[in-house]
Image (cartoon, rainbow, N blue to C red):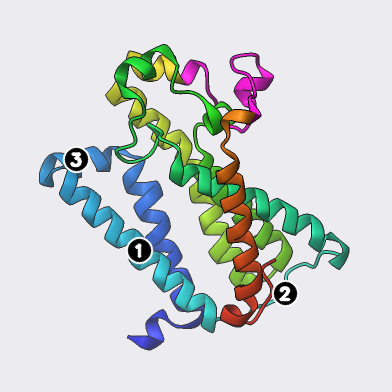
Amino acid sequence: MTELISGMNGLILGAVVFAAVHLLIAGTPVRAALVGAIGDMPYQGVFSLLSIIGLVVMIYGYGGAQPELLWSVPVVLDSLFGAIILIAFIFIVAGLTVKNPTLMGGMMGGDDALSKGDAAIGFLRITRHPMMWGITIWSAVHLIKNGDSRSLVLFGTLLVVALVGPTQIDKRRAASMGESWDKFAAVTSNVPFGAIVQGRNSFKFGELGLWRIALGAALFAAMFYFHPQITGVSLY
């Protein structure tokens, strides 16, 4: 069993499980069929369990896989990569702390506020999927910076799932929430700053919450310090 999930074999196996659960089940009619058969809560439990198993196996396999360098980037870009990862941490914190209908059980301000578009404030003015874009940015930076075979599998899988996920979520919310979702979606965007550039919303820094930015920076600083001790390599 250990041999099956160690090294590149385990990394690929975990990636297949993780990607299949998110791309071939959660975002397809298979999900509706499973929910109809076993109920929503049991489905969510099985989905979460399989996702965790896939992720754990990927990480375990990544640790034992021998990296084959595929490309390299100039060291001078390290500071830029660090700044971008800081932004990713802030987006992830926002995704975890902002009430958002795109998250599981994430209604915000009730149906009335949602239908009027009043819920589209703060980070949601930037994107209605801050968590997914935080993961996208984080994964992309690690993939580009590392440039090796095992990173291509691990971070490439996370990147693809994070990029495809918002479209799948939007389709499910549109089907389940109807007009309320349509009004919310009309003043928000998946792509960061899309609604603002198109004039469907406006940027208001004061609504972001300085504590979220500070928490994201604090987590970045903690990871910057502990990452080499945990993994043996720098954060980026």
Q: Quadrant of residue 226?
A: bottom right
User: What residue range appears in magenta?
Assistant: 185-205
Q: Are marks 2 and 1 in contact (CB under 8 Å)?
A: no
**Secondary structure of residue under mark 2:** loop
Q: In the rendered structure, which amino acid carries the disc numbered 2?
A: Leu
Q: How many marks?
A: 3
Q: Earlier in the sequence, mark 1 or mark 3?
A: 3
Q: In the rendered structure, which amino acid carries the disc numbered 3?
A: Ala
- Mark yes or no: residue 41 visible: yes
Q: Quadrant of residue 123?
A: top right
Please name the residue that numbered disc 1 is placed on.
52
Going 26% across and 43% down the picture, which residue do you hit?
A: 30
Q: Earlier in the sequence, mark 2 or mark 1?
A: 1
Residue sitting nearer the eye, 47 or 102: 102
**Secondary structure of residue under mark 3:** helix
Task: Tell me the tag on residue 69.
Answer: 2
Residue 194 in the image: state x and y as whole percent. Answer: 63, 25
- In the visual, does 222 lie left or right of 170? right
Picture layout, residue 10 above or below residue 2:
above
**Secondary structure of residue under mark 1:** helix
* Quadrant in which the C terminus appears: bottom right
Picture layout, residue 37 above or below residue 176:
below
Spatial CA span between label 3 and label 2: 42 Å
Q: Are marks 3 and 2 in contact (CB under 8 Å)?
A: no
- In the visual, does 172 lie left or right of 92? left
| Tag nearer the camera, 1 or 3 | 1
